[in-house]
Image (cartoon, helix red, strand yellow):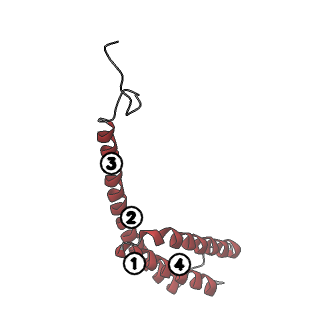
Amino acid sequence: MIEEKETQLKQYLELTKAVSKALHQGEEGKVPVLIEKREACISTINKLDAEAGMVLINENIQAQLEELIILEKEIQSKMQHMMKRLSHRVRYAQNEQYLRSQYEDWVTVSKGVFYDSKK
């Protein structure tokens, strides 16, 4: 059972490295798919621990977890930076939309029709 957990944790570690690499290269579109695969690994690991009735751990698992902690902090930092950039883009787009709406016609008159105002 512990070997299966090591295998799943190794796969989780590889997926985490792939997430970090995708964020570093600016390929944010790949991240959600990789995160879903990581979630599947986590659920499998949790099932293994539940079947054993305790948290399965050894030196290899401990080393992998320490490496994962470092990668997770890096990913968290990159994700926060990406969220700030997206927030700035959204605010910029909203500001542009607001400025454009200030110059739209307020009177609902079909264009191209002449109305005689002297009548």
Indicate the secondary structure of the residue bearing disc 1.
Answer: helix
Nearest to viewer (mark 3 / mark 4): 3
45 with respect to 102 (left or right): right
Kind of residue at disc 4: Tyr
| Res 18 quadrant in image | bottom left
Nearest to viewer (mark 3 / mark 1): 3
Q: From the viewer's perspective, is residue 55 above or below residue 103?
A: below
Indicate the secondary structure of the residue bearing disc 4.
Answer: helix
- Percent x, y of residue 19: 44, 74
Q: Which mark is residue 91?
A: 3
Q: Which mark is residue 79?
A: 2
- Estimate how packed mark 2 is, as few (under 14), some (14 to 19) or many (20 or more) residues with alpha carbons within 10 Å: some
Kind of residue at disc 1: Lys
Residue ID at (59%, 75%): 41
Q: CA distance from mark 2 to mark 3?
A: 18 Å
- Percent x, y of residue 6: 57, 84
Tag 2 and tag 4, C-beta contact below 8 Å: no
42 with respect to 82 (left or right): right
Residue sitting at the far right: 51
